[in-house]
Amino acid sequence: MKSIHIMILVAVTTVRMYRKALCTHAFISSSSITTKSQRSAYKVAFGSGLSKYRTSSSYLYSTVSDSNEEKARILFLGTPDVAATCLQKIVEESKKDGSPFDVVGVVTQPPKRRKRRGKEVPSPVGIAAEELNIPVLCPEKAKDPDFLTDLEENFKPDLCITAAYGQYLPKRFLAVPKFGTLNIHPSLLPRWRGASPVQRSLEAGDNPVGVTVLFTVSKMDAGPIVRQKTENIDENDDATKLLPFLFDVGTESLLDVIPDVLSGKVTMDNALKQDEELVADANMIDSSEGELRVCKDSARACHNKIRGFSMWPGTFLYFRIGDDEDYEPMKVKVIESKVVGEAGSADVTDDIELGPNKKDGLRVVCGDGSVLELLKVQPATRKAMDAKSFVNGLRGERLRWIKMDEESDE
């Protein structure tokens, strides 16, 4: 009897050890594996040995069961919240009767510290994958040899899907899935290829906007188009609202085309080639771009920048309070705005005043005589507030916008 109890204890302990190994290494970076013991632990969490360790009813950290081995194997790559929502919808679709695919793994950026001495926090996609019991890989770089070998020898995806992953995919990676790699890109390609498509399209005042599902090739966002959806938007819609909306639309488009891709009906060869003459680059945004140049830009251009940069880096103006020229200017973030007058509708002035109606905001006259109304602002070190609350804090002092760097406007 004692020996039976010992055997049971050993079995339970073994299962707990493998559970702990899986959870501990769910977000391990393959490039950080240097010792033999670390490499062994990496294989326990992500390698082919995973399917050997079962609970009474299911694989540990695996979505693959004996009943669906014939399904196509999909590997998902993504990082932020919008990609996590995309992953959840794809997994939900994979669980429906008759689904031709299964999500067998997730690749995301390594965990990062949100504070200098804080704990490392997994990406939103990493957290979602853990909740869905899907194996997670977090290579520092997608070109990492151990990571690529693991894909080739263990995960063996038939199709890869990327949604805001945030890393360049090397040719060796692209050669792994036999049906290729599909990407959800929130713009109407070939317009706005690059890191900031939604921000740049809003900054440019595009309407309609849209989302594209395309095959991934070595050149960024240059692959043939599988599906494209156009959407009309409101003139006040900003990136905070538009980005998740476009990824939702893109995910639905993706799910529509997956069966045709897996059946071979849609391929890299017969998908729509992009017109290189229509390419516009969505370059990464620099924080210095956030300053509103009301002296030279129109109210519409400033409003579009406020919309486009709502998530990051935000937009700002410098205000001078009172008539004292020695008073240190105040940096004020502009959170919400609207255009209330086009070019020539007002006399140019640097004075800023509330509009005549009860709910009006702060009215800024731009260099061409157009009028931008600031509805919600945030002074440095203060919380965001509506325009009237900001003015109430001035106690009747004069308010003007100023240029901080004369040379930058030349």
Image (tube, helix red, strand yellow):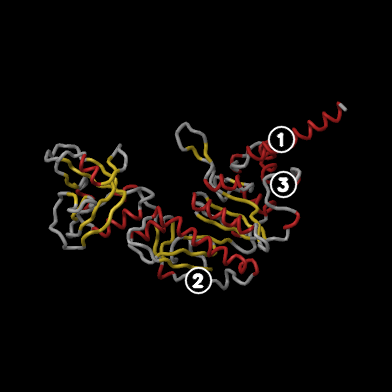
The answer to whether the residue labelled 3 contacts the one labelled 2, judged by CB atoms less than 8 Å apart, is: no
Could you tell me how far apart the alpha carbons at marks 3 and 2 are, in whole angstroms?
42 Å
Residue under circle 1? 16
What secondary structure is marked by label 3? loop
Q: x and y percent of residue 317 in the render?
A: 25, 47
Count of numbered tags = 3
Q: x and y percent of residue 300 in the render?
A: 26, 60
What secondary structure is marked by label 2? loop
Q: Quadrant of the C terminus?
A: bottom left
Q: Is residue 217 visible?
A: no
Q: Which mark is residue 342?
A: none
The answer to whether the residue labelled 2 contacts the one labelled 1, judged by CB atoms less than 8 Å apart, is: no
Badge 3 density bin: few <14, some 14–19, many ≥20, Cα 10 Å: some
Q: Which mark is residue 59?
A: 3
The mark lying in front, picked from 2 and 1, is: 1
Residue under circle 2? 273
Query: What residue sits 35% from the left and 52% below the top?
Result: 309
From this view, report whether residue 188 is shown above or below residue 121: below
What secondary structure is marked by label 1? helix
Decide if residue 93 is on the left or right side of residue 337.
right
Badge 2 density bin: few <14, some 14–19, many ≥20, Cα 10 Å: some
Give the residue type that dot 3 points to: Tyr
- Nearest the camera: 383 or 11? 383
Query: What residue sits 12% from the left and 38% below the top?
Result: 324
Query: What residue sits 70% from the left and 53% below the top?
Result: 64
Q: Residue furthest right?
A: 1
